[in-house]
Amino acid sequence: MNTYGWAARDSSGILSPFHFERRANDDNDITIKILFCGICHSDLHFAKNEAGMTSYPFVPGHEIVGEVTKVGHNVTKFKIGDKAGVGCMVGSCGSCENCKQDLEVYCPEMIWTLKTFGGYSENIVIDEHFAVLIPNSLPLHGAAPLLCAGITVYSPMMYYGLCKPGQHLGVVGLGGLGHVAVKFAKALGMKVTVISTSPSKKNEAVERLGVDSFLVSHDQEQLQAAMGTMDGIIDTVSGPHSILPLINLLKTNGKLVAVGVPTEAPEIPYIPLIMGRKLIGGSAAGGMKETQEMVDFAAKHNIIADIEVIPMDYVNTAMERLAKGDVKYRFVIDVANTLNSSF
Ligand code: NAP
Ligand code: ZN
């Protein structure tokens, strides 16, 4: 099938219109007409080949929502007209230990959406297993970021047991991932502290997102006063940073979970971990079953991302602004109305 989107051609990361082929819709596949696609910081890391893993031309986009326009013979989850979402992965082996436990994202043969042509495009053809049903009550533009930002913070909160009412959760970096983590944690009845490099985000974080406290990460006094108070921390930071101050914020037995992929890996300070029986873990997105559970949880609690909707031809400016942290808190491309085939 002939289709089109916007692609980066080299590590400048600059995107421009691009025509390409999608596979035909097979028996287990659905075709989704893409309506909205979020811009995750991973799209930017990949467009600029910051991890050295990008193949060009690269069509970003893994926070995809749209309408099902075709269903294969074996498809049971979707019918034409349903709203569907696609996130970080489009395939896995289906038979390994991870796949059998609904942890497809940890399958050695898992296929990242970023390694295929992603969602800054007209449509996508995907095995129905790797799509989730978007409940009708969720506005689609605000739901798009749930497909990556949402599951990437929800999954570790559940797995590491950082989801209980009354627990104190630190969220480092109030960006796309971070602000959704705040919303989930508040819906779960947790106490939430944001640890941020941006003092300018404080008022809104407290007044609109309802965070209980806001620490500026370069203010030693504030950090000192909060030492030993947190049950867990979700670190969403995309740039170089030190994790020692974060470990110090944890209570005994506290857990620091890395989900951000900083451009330089932080040093791991063993002694403070040992002296507080603390743990550092990581987490990648989440399995498909859990992604559906997360979307349903979001629908139940009316949680969507705070977004700035943009036209397709604004994407390069949006990427520049994202690199500077100048977005509250997620860009979402209005694909259906602004992606133009006449180029
Ligand atoms: P984002 O919207 O750009 O948010 C990142 C936030 O981190 C920024 O808003 C900023 O918050 C803070 N920050 C950025 N650079 C910093 C630096 N040098 N030092 C300290 N703080 C800094 O990005 P995102 O889309 O949420 O993604 C965050 C990271 O998660 C990216 O690295 C992305 O690739 C990664 N990611 C991982 C997974 C996974 O599966 N584990 C999935 C999706 C994304 P403040 O202004 O509040 O400091
Ligand atoms: Zn992402």
Image (cartoon, helix red, strand yellow):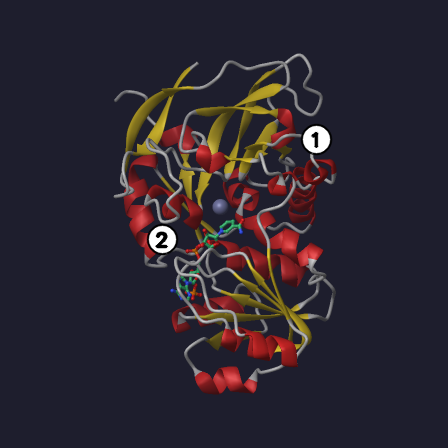
- Location of mark 2 (residue): 322
Under circle 2, the secondary element is helix
Observer-nearest of 50 and 234: 50
Q: Picture coordinates of residue 299 (x, y %)?
A: 66, 45
Crowd rating for badge 2 (residues with CA inside 10 Å; few <14, some 14–19, many 20+)? many
Observer-nearest of 102 and 179: 102
Ranked by sequence position, the earlier of labels 1 and 2 is: 1
The circle on residue 263 is: none
| Residue at position x 33%, y 47% in the image | 318
Q: Picture coordinates of residue 128 (x, y %)?
A: 63, 25
| Residue at position x 47%, y 62% in the image | 174
| Residue at position x 56%, y 25% in the image | 126
Q: Picture coordinates of residue 135 (x, y %)?
A: 65, 36
As drawn, 300 above or below 178 = above
Under circle 1, the secondary element is loop
Check disc 1 and give the amino acid type: Ser
User: What is the distance, in whole Å, between disc 1 and disc 2 at their CAs?
Assistant: 38 Å
As drawn, 113 above or below 22 = below
CB of mark 2 near ligand 1 (< 8 Å): yes
Q: Is residue 229 visible?
A: no
Q: Picture coordinates of residue 202 (x, y %)?
A: 46, 71
Res 77 quadrant in image: top right
The circle on residue 95 is: 1
Quadrant field for ligand 1: bottom left
Crowd rating for badge 1 (residues with CA inside 10 Å; few <14, some 14–19, many 20+)? few
Check disc 2 and give the amino acid type: Leu
Q: Is residue 47 visible?
A: yes
As drawn, 145 above or below 201 = above
Where the C terminus falls, by quadrant?
Answer: top left
